[in-house]
Image: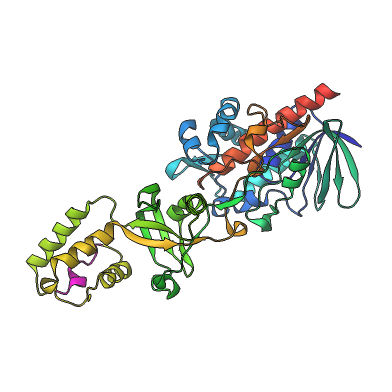
Amino acid sequence: MEYDVIVIGGGPSGLMAAIAAGEKGAKVLLIDKGEKLGRKLAISGGGRCNVTNRLPVEEIIKHLPGNGKFLYSAFSIFSNEDIIAFFEKLGISLKEEDHGRMFPVSNKAQSVVDALLEQLEKLHVRVFKNSPVAEVIYENGQTAAVLLKDGQKIAAKSIVIAVGGKSVPHTGSTGDGYAWAEKAGHTITELFPTEVPVTSSEPFIRNKTLQGLALRDIDVSVLNPKGKPIISHRMDMLFTHFGISGPAVLRCSQFVVKAMKKWKLKEVTMSLDALPDKKEEEIFQEIIDLVKSEPKKSIKNTLKGLLPERYLLFLLEQNGIDPSEQGGTISNDKIRSFAKSCKQFLINVNGTLPLEKAFVTGGGVSVKEIEPQTMGSKLMAGLFFCGEILDVHGYTGGYNITSALVTGRLAGTNAAYAAKNRA
């Protein structure tokens, strides 16, 4: 049995690639090693499926710090607005939420998965589930066939590899595709976790002093060895039993990994600014004025509401201030140092949770070896890549899924054209 296009991997990019190839009239087979297609889609956006982001393309590319610029050509062919139109045509109405994130009106990721599966059926795309691929076979400088682990060999004119990276392995992303890419001559850039919680062995983390405490709308920075910020993100964060997490920290995580590598460090310093809208001097003066107006009041009551209570008591103690002490008896130096720690509380971090615990894989098939308009391999005729196996990664918020759907669309469309040209 020969197919025009075989797509390996039933995640967002693979489903999109199979549909795109089917729409071009190609005879398509979609192979997935799991029981269910679209598993990553079904859990994305907290089970609501953040299908894309409506920000302008320039902004989306800024939110893809891992080689986002590679996608400029792709976006000019199939953009985030085209993704929205594509889903609406499938009967999935979308709504816009904060920061441009687009969700199905149903709030159910499964409705998105079901619509894609229905479209595969309409286009007569064959689907093999529970069918792990052993290898991709190349002959005479072009794709030839796929060999399944059960011994079946299936010929194809074009092959799309859409098996994801190594993050969230319970959805089937276990890095299988890297070996098939290397066999075709491709370079796999070093893999690392991104969008992942950060670890620390600071005493207050080990003692779980702040475990479970969330700080809202805080500025989190990763500092270089000279103490200058490499990156800052203003969002929420969370203290955990092993370190820190939450949206601001996840966005900073890849910069922790890169800084440790670049400067060969065992630890990197991060800085927390809990009052990003105020200057240090302003905070100092406000506290001095409050203390002057009620010098006998305990400092913790004077400062009530300035910060979440647990964090307030923690910072007071860090600066040698007894929370029950009367404000009037505390030296200006101590108040100044407290004001400073509201603006820049430094925490040493020593890495991140492993790649398997990350939301997104950094690294992958080098984009220098991929045609940006087609997602075709520059090294092997008939081979296409899409989604997270590529060395393209972004922050959470619909950016990675946008990249997966856009690259999937191009890979599937062009795999169909390549198959017709080989016919």
Q: Is residue 337 above or below residue 369?
A: below
Q: Is residue 90 visible?
A: no
Q: Position of residue 403 (x, y in %)?
A: 59, 38
Residue found at the very far left of the displayed protein: 293
Please check the rendered image and state whether residue 299 is part of the magenta-colored stretch, yes or no.
Answer: yes
**In which image quadrant can residue 401 be found?**
top right
Closest to the observer: 403 or 335? 335
The residue range painted magenta reads 297-306
Measuring 70% from the left and 32% from the top, which residue is drawn there?
411
- Asked which quadrant contains residue 249, the reply is bottom left
Q: Which residue occupies 50% across, 35% down?
A: 61
Give the image quarter of residue 204. bottom left
Left or right side of 101 for 35: right
The number of numbered discs placed on residues in the rendered structure image is 0
Residue 19 visible? The answer is yes
Image height of 410 relative to 276, above or below: above
Question: Which one is nearer the viewer's eye here, 247 or 251?
Answer: 251
Relative to 26, residue 12 above or below: below
Q: In front: 195, or 89?
A: 195
Query: Hey, which residue is sitting farthest top in the picture?
Result: 421
Q: Nearer the viewer, residue 98 or 371?
A: 371
Residue in the image at 51% along x and 50% along y: 254
